[in-house]
Amino acid sequence: MSATQIADTVDAAEIAKFEAMAAEWWDPSGKFKPLHMLNPCRLDYVTAQVAAEFDRDRKAPRPFAGLRLLDIGCGGGLLAEPMARLGAQVVGADAAARNIPVARIHAAQSGLAIDYRHTTAEALAAAGEVFDVVLNMEVIEHVADPPAYLAACRRLLRPGGLMVASTLNRNPKSYAMAIIGAERVMRWLPKGTHDWSRFVTPDECFELLRGAGLDPVDRKGFVFNPLSWTWRISDRDLSVNYVTTSLRPAEG
């Protein structure tokens, strides 16, 4: 794979948006407030899926010891850090260079050994990196070429490995909630953070995953309650935020 091909799915304009917000990753009241609010729900789903697939007890002190995990699009480390605390050997990768020093400093302050890198899924795959688990959270809607990006993610999984990927549905409700609500009314995110046309329906997502050579095995919704200001996992409501689990076939 050439250097040009490696960079194909990276959208410079999308990366610039997150570079501008890098210093605020660990401010629970800042521009990443929605992620801080969602994070416990995301973590619950991720840990349940990993524990089930690899037969681990989530109540154990370090249940994911021995598992190598990649958090692609790691940002400031909101998921990488708890997964490291749970015993996983974590590599955090992000195409936005300014996120990496923020993540490294916070991990050091937290006493965590996390391998943070300014790189892409394609570059990691080209280097022959392989993981038991790939976390691919809120990235698909920001890349220039989702099929090529997911194909790279598949190459990063060992046979039998697991990928958890979350994204945003594309429908009138998601436009109202994610664009009008989150960016314009609540001002949780700067205007233009999301491009609604890049959102992916659950059926499209499963088709993309299968096209990349992965086997989708689960999908759930992340549902926000504006009265209690909390998130929950839903078996049925995938209308705005949703998450999927897929496996790389053991023979693939």
Image: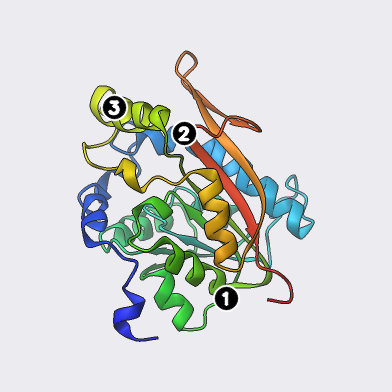
The reply to whether the C-beta atoms of the residues labelled 1 and 3 are less than 8 Å apart is no
The quarter holding residue 28 reads top left
Q: Split into 4 quadrants, where in the image is the C terminus? A: bottom right
Is label 2 or label 1 in front? 2
Q: The residue tagged with tag 1: helix, strand or loop?
A: loop
Q: Which of marks 2 and 1 is nearer the N terminus?
A: 1
Classify residue 131 as left or right of residue 175.
right
For label 1, count other residues whose C-alpha is less than 10 Å away and answer few (under 14), some (14-19) or many (20+).
Answer: many
Q: The residue tagged with tag 3: helix, strand or loop?
A: helix
Residue 226, how many percent across, how many down? Answer: 44, 17
Q: The residue tagged with tag 2: helix, strand or loop?
A: loop
Residue under numbered circle 3: 180
What residue do we see at 68% from left, 50% from top? Answer: 49
Disc 2 to disc 1, how far (Cα)?
A: 31 Å
Give the residue type at disc 1. Val
Query: Exactly how many numbered labels are in the figure?
Result: 3
**Image: 250 above or below 136:** below
Residue 81, how many percent across, how many down? Answer: 50, 52
Give the residue type at disc 3. Ile
Q: Split into 4 quadrants, where in the image is the N terminus? A: bottom left
Q: Earlier in the sequence, mark 1 or mark 3?
A: 1
For label 2, count other residues whose C-alpha is less than 10 Å away and answer few (under 14), some (14-19) or many (20+).
Answer: many
For label 3, count other residues whose C-alpha is less than 10 Å away and answer few (under 14), some (14-19) or many (20+).
Answer: some
**Which numbered disc covers residue 130?**
1
Residue under numbered circle 2: 240
